[in-house]
Image (spheres, rainbow, N blue to C red):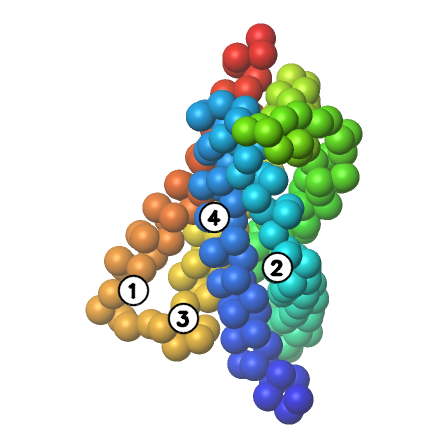
Amino acid sequence: MKYLSSSIGRKQLMSVTGIVWLGFVLTHMLGNLLIFLGPDAYNAYSHAIVSNPLLFIAEALLVITLLTHVFTGVKLTAENKSARSNKYAMPTNGEKAARFQSKFMIFHGSLILVFIISHLITFKYGPHYVTTVHGVEMRDLYKLVFEVFQNPLYVAWYCVALVCLGLHLSHGFFSSLASIGIYNPKFASLISKFGYVYAVVVAVGFISQPLYVYLIAH
């Protein structure tokens, strides 16, 4: 408990929980790309996930790590603000950059949290259509996706949220690895660039789904 109450401990805890979500958003994005293969492939993939007996454990892990990440981030941000003994002092360039990144990470994170809740309400707990694939009755999530993404306002909101996710991931990728000790000055530039590539791939992959659906539906 003493370790987790320390600044270093909280930073590392935030990094570990962030890494869990780094893996999740990538796999989720790849699964979404199955929409390009048609309704059967997309619905079969969705059904395989919801019918998996380990789903409850996976969802519980994601919820716990997300809440831990959010609360730890808020705590660290509050501590950083209170640690400034002279808030009127002229900050150095490095301090300016750190404050700038910190402020916007909180902004990204808050918007992403709202998006996650909205996303769950819209899709996980949204209308339940039924279809049959290879003789198996399952939820027609493909139909729901096409229905939702015909709304240009929702498509715009989705794209803005995913751009913010990309920005959040690009900084979070590097900082998470650095906080848990996976860092070498020789490879810092390479890791940073890989983080940017990862963030762009994830954001573009997610955004491609609503744009594809909206353009086809219209």
Cβ–Cβ under 8 Å for marks 4 and 3: no
**Residue placed most toward the observer, 39 or 114:** 39
Q: CA distance from mark 4 to mark 2?
A: 16 Å
Tag 1–tag 4 contact (CB < 8 Å):
no
Question: Which type of secondary structure does the marked residue at label 1 adopt?
Answer: helix
Q: CA distance from mark 1 to mark 4?
A: 25 Å
Q: Earlier in the sequence, mark 4 or mark 3?
A: 4
* Image quadrant assignment for residue 131: top right
- What is the number of the mark on residue 188? 1
In what element is the residue under mark 4?
helix
Quadrant of the rendered image containing residue 87? bottom right
Tell me residue 32's x, y (percent): 51, 36
Which part of the image, by quadrant, shows the C terminus? Answer: top right
Q: Residues within 10 Å of mark 3 (few under 14, many from 20)?
A: some
- At 53% from the left and 14% from the top, the residue drawn is 215
**Which residue is labeled 3 in the image?**
178
In the image, farthest residue toward the left:
186
Q: Which residue is mark 4?
A: 27
| In contact (CB < 8 Å): disc 4 and disc 2 | no
- Measured from the top left, where is residue 71 in percent x and y? 70, 66
The dot on residue 54 is 2
